[in-house]
Amino acid sequence: MAETPGGENLLYLTDEQLRKGIEAMFFAYRGFTADPDRILEGKDYGRAHHRAIHFIHRSPGTTVSNLLSILGVTKQSLNRVLRTLIEDGLVRSEKGKVDARERHLHLTDKGQMLERELSDAQRARMRAAYRAAGPQAVAGFRQVLEAMMDPEMRRQYNRLKEGG
Amino acid sequence: MAETPGGENLLYLTDEQLRKGIEAMFFAYRGFTADPDRILEGKDYGRAHHRAIHFIHRSPGTTVSNLLSILGVTKQSLNRVLRTLIEDGLVRSEKGKVDARERHLHLTDKGQMLERELSDAQRARMRAAYRAAGPQAVAGFRQVLEAMMDPEMRRQYNRLKEGG
DNA sequence: TTGGAAAGTCAACAAGGCTGACGTAAATTC
DNA sequence: GAATTTACGTCAGCCTTGTTGACTTTCCAA
């Protein structure tokens, strides 16, 4: 066994183990997005709409620029998605009262319904995976994912965590 | 604490915990792809090329149809990527000897070099995350990801695991 | 009052998915 | 030996979702 002077086993850091982790991320992410993708298929929306809906649901009243920094896309790209959601009556956009340049975003009842459908499907898969792996594994899963984020993204993630 | 008749704590299965897991996947996957994306940016290649290169490296001599089933895209989509890699001399395509309809794919030396550059970057991040989280966490990470895959993808993943 | 931030819009483009149709060579089946 | 199936390649066209660049409107704050 490969041991450090300190005595810990470092076999989990071999290139082979890292490669398995990389491939696990690749295949798991496919599963992660599969159910919402299927639901959206028939509805004229895509993954970008799902992401916007998720984070508006998560932080009702959030501004466009806040959403931009969470999603990491350009405003032109987000705007296209947001516009269709507003036109279709899933999202409501309100001028800010304290700062009227800002637009505060909320899901309408119709938007809530779609959000529910999407997140129910995604949570069902996550719940099954969590249950199959058990609480210890889940704690480790979250630790590794968190360590994998860019610092800026980790900040966003933790801000959301606290808020909830 | 919420306990089952059996006595286990099921708080890790609450909607709140599941939502955190979902957001962790989203932000972590961004980090996961960030380094290779940056490297490919200047090189006229994208994530699709990276995926092809990864799995050809992983299974030298693999056929086009095998690659198709691993990547889960159409042959037209894969072909576009593969053609540029072959034209640019990163990938070599050989008629099969036992079945001449098949094309067996290999990385050239030039292809190996790019693969190295990409996977070094991706492994560096993964290694840092693994090290930060520790071996117990890594085991859990892998368990949850595996449970999250579609059965078909899990089959692919395990075939690769054994092969390596 | 003016500079700059926030938001939105238009136009053009690229990557990378998709479908459908068609062609060819080789293997398999009848 | 003929017909069918398989593996692969390719053309054409479409969609989503990302990009850059240029420009306007609104309005807060120095």
Image (tube, coloured by chain):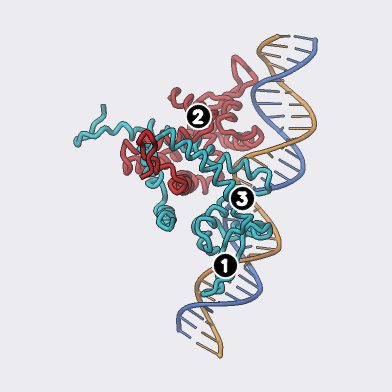
Chain colours: A red, B cyan, C blue, D orange
Q: What secondary structure is marked by label 2? A: helix
Q: Quadrant of the C terminus of chain A?
A: top left
Name the mark nearer the viewer: 3 or 2. 3
Amino acid type at image mark 2: Arg
Q: Earlier in the sequence, mark 3 or mark 1?
A: 1
Image x and y of residue A32, in percent:
45, 44
Tell me, yes or no, if residue A53 can be seen here. yes
> What residue do we see at 53% from left, 29% from top?
A151
Identify residue for label 1.
B103
Q: What secondary structure is marked by label 3? A: helix
Identify residue for label 3.
B114
Amino acid type at image mark 3: Leu
> Chain ID for label 3?
B
Near-viewer residue (A41 or A88): A41
**Mark seen at residue A154:** 2
User: Crowding near pointer 2: few (<14 within 10 Å), some, many (20+)?
Assistant: some
Direction from residue B80 to residue B10 in the image, left or right: left
> What residue do we see at 43% from left, 53% from top?
B157
Q: Residue furthest front?
A: A5
